[in-house]
Amino acid sequence: MQQMMSRYGGHDFLIGKGKVSYANLPEDQSQVNLLDNYAAEIIPNHYLVSTYDAQPYWMADYTSLPNVPGSPRAVKVGTIEHTFNEILMQYKIKVSTDIYLTHHGNKNVYLSYIMTEGRHLKEFMPNYQKCYDLVLMLCIRDDDLETKLSKNSASLQKLLLINLYKMGATGDCYGKFTPSKTPLGKNLPDDIDAILRKSLATMESDEALVACLNSIQT
């Protein structure tokens, strides 16, 4: 049942074939090909691959944060308390999800891992296993880009917004965001919870996400 969560390729299934979104992926699912020929340019120079849309084979779940060659160990940005809606359920379940970021290969290619605490989920998903899901890859093509997220609050906030929107932590599903005490968490504005709450309050479409991302000053 855990693989039915929307973070593993969306909600829609084809009987005997798995998630509908698999058909949208190219045969060559390497990072380079995905960014060059598949990723959506959500705003100018920002190219996104999200497992909520379709899940490349290597964007998987891990029992611990992986040590990948060419990718520093991911750093926690913060924790979002939210309503879990990745599987349609009769009752609302409140969960908390930790968000981690790193870069991969080129320093302008960012990866996001999320880990959802499953204490309440186990009542409905007895076999739920807590893991670190690689859910997002974002490439920012800008010669003047400050690639260190600990020094680039604008890109850090964009990555957070995309993550929360894809998770469905919008409107009434948004609870509270608490930044970590890492260099990434410390590079967020003091009022980041209020900023995110206001931004996500009425974010019901990709167009609303784009408008919000474009409003963030670099």
Image (tube, rainbow, N blue to C red):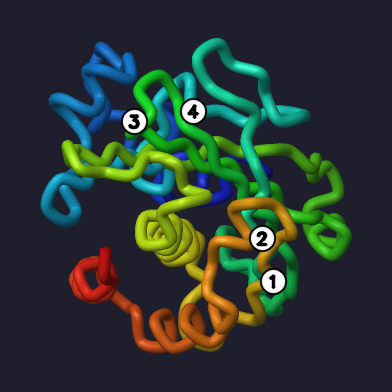
- Relative placement, left or right, of 163 versus 64 is left
- Labels 3, 2: front one: 2
Element marked by disc 3: helix
Q: Amino acid at mark 1?
A: Thr
* Relative height, residue 79 to residue 57 (above, below): below
According to the picture, the residue beneath numbered tag 3 turns out to be 22
According to the picture, the residue beneath numbered tag 1 turns out to be 178
Residue 60 or residue 149, whichever sits in front? 149
Comes first in the chain, label 3 or label 2:
3
- Labels 4, 1: front one: 1
* Relative height, residue 195 to residue 55 (above, below): below
Q: CA distance from mark 1 to mark 2?
A: 5 Å
Q: CA distance from mark 2 to mark 4?
A: 21 Å
Q: CA distance from mark 1 to mark 3?
A: 34 Å
Residue 167 or residue 210, whichever sits in front? 210
Proximity of marks 1 and 2: CB atoms separated by less than 8 Å: yes
According to the picture, the residue beneath numbered tag 4 turns out to be 59
Residue 154 or residue 58, whichever sits in front? 154
Residue 52 or residue 194, whichever sits in front? 194
Q: CA distance from mark 4 to mark 1?
A: 26 Å
